[in-house]
């Protein structure tokens, strides 16, 4: 027996918190807390209909497609300016059945197109959903639209440094020597819910002083989104707000999230008075060092081709826009 129902964000949250739930939640951008914050802050309720689609086979949950629909086109919940990539959520080993049933359901609902972006090349949306649509004689068009960068983390900081080339390794060691001479240095990580809003004030000051385009990006609406997101992620113990302090004053910050043995670097900023020390770069390096000490498996710099990502050893991964006529 096949059953497809529409769900709420509360339903998603209950699935995610259920230790017996078979689903594989692929990354932070598909977690219920993240999806709800985005929809609450940016979802255009006049233009789009929320359609969180749950696919069951008998008593088995095969997957969830968190969609929003406009006309005859379905999109994954999220906006590419603040959600680096998207996907559907499938049970391991069940993605083919899930995608087949999902496509049949959407077609029956009058949906003619799926407009999905950005997507990782290892996403269920590309590897299975697009393939199943082609198998059903649909039209699929995918193009590379951006890149992400990440590092597989070794067991120690020394091993990480040895992964880098000689120029990269020399730069990190030289910058740390200069930093050590600058005063009282402290790296700290804020995770607790009750401290988030106060510490975010420091983060926003550093973010705005970094570059003019970043200051322009942080509108009042965007700040509300960042605060809501940080609070929601702290409540499920996934926030890591990192600071590099010099003489007890924040000199750089990195807003990170910790999920499934991966640290995601979401955004950052630094005090331009310390630009000569490279504090923004070093705060990220210290975040990597902290992640290694916490036995994390990977460090994800997320979307964009900023040079510092390669200087810290990041490896590029293409991201795709996939449009499917079903």
Image: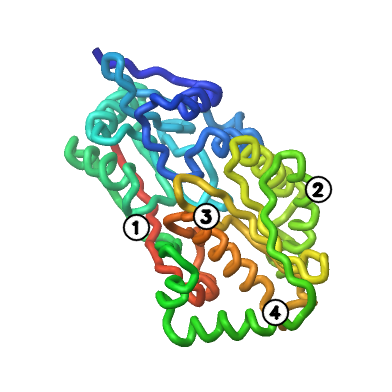
Q: Which residue is mark 1?
A: 143
Q: Quadrant of residue 115?
A: top left
Q: Position of residue 38 (x, y in %)?
A: 60, 39
User: In 3D space, how far apart are the residues under numbered discs 2 and 3 (Cα atoms)?
Assistant: 25 Å
Mark 4 and mark 1 lie on one chain; the one further toward the N terminus is 1
Q: Which residue is mark 4?
A: 179
Q: Which residue is mark 2?
A: 198
Q: Which residue is mark 3?
A: 294
Mark 4 and mark 3 lie on one chain; the one further toward the N terminus is 4
Q: Is residue 275 above or below residue 72?
A: below
Mark 2 and mark 4 lie on one chain; the one further toward the N terminus is 4
> Badge 4 local density, few (<14 within 10 Å), some, or many (20+)?
some
Q: Secondary structure at mark 2?
A: helix
Mark 2 and mark 3 lie on one chain; the one further toward the N terminus is 2
Residue mark closest to the camera, 2 vs 4: 4
Q: Secondary structure at mark 1?
A: strand
User: In 3D space, how far apart are the residues under numbered discs 4 and 3 (Cα atoms)?
Assistant: 23 Å
Q: Give 236 or 13, whichever is nearer the viewer.
A: 236
User: In 3D space, how far apart are the residues under numbered discs 1 and 2 (Cα atoms)?
Assistant: 42 Å
Left or right of 314? Residue 326 is left
Q: Position of residue 222 (x, y in %)?
A: 70, 48
């Amino acid at each position: 027996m096949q059953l497809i129902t529409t769900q709420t964000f509360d339903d998603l949250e209950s699935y995610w918190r259920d230790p017996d739930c078979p689903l594989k939640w692929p990354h932070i951008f598909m977690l219920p807390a993240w999806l709800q914050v985005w929809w609450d802050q940016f979802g255009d309720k006049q233009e789009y209909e929320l359609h969180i689609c749950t696919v069951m086979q008998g008593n088995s949950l095969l997957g969830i497609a968190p969609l929003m629909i406009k006309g005859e086109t379905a999109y994954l919940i999220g906006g590419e300016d603040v959600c680096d990539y998207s996907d559907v959520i499938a049970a391991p080993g069940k993605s083919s059945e899930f995608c087949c049933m999902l496509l049949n359901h959407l077609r029956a609902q009058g949906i003619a197109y799926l407009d999905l972006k950005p997507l990782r090349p290892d996403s269920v949306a590309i590897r299975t959903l697009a393939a199943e649509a082609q198998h059903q004689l649909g039209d699929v068009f995918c193009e590379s639209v951006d890149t992400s960068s990440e590092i597989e983390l070794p067991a120690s900081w020394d091993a990480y440094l040895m992964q880098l080339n000689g120029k990269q390794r020399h730069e990190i060691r030289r910058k740390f020597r200069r930093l050590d001479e600058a005063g009282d240095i402290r790296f700290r990580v804020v995770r607790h819910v009750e401290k988030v809003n106060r510490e975010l004030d420091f983060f926003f000051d550093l973010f705005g002083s970094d570059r003019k385009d970043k200051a322009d990006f942080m509108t009042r609406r965007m700040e509300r989104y960042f605060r809501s997101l940080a609070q929601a992620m702290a409540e499920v113990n996934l926030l890591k707000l990192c600071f590099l302090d010099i003489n007890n004053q924040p000199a750089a910050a990195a807003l990170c999230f910790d999920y499934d043995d991966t640290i995601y670097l979401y955004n950052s900023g630094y005090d331009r008075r310390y630009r000569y020390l490279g504090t923004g770069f070093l705060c990220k390096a210290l975040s990597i060092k902290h992640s290694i000490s916490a036995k994390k498996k990977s460090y994800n710099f997320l979307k964009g081709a900023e040079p510092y990502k390669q200087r810290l050893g990041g490896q590029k991964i293409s991201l795709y826009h996939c449009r499917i006529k079903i």
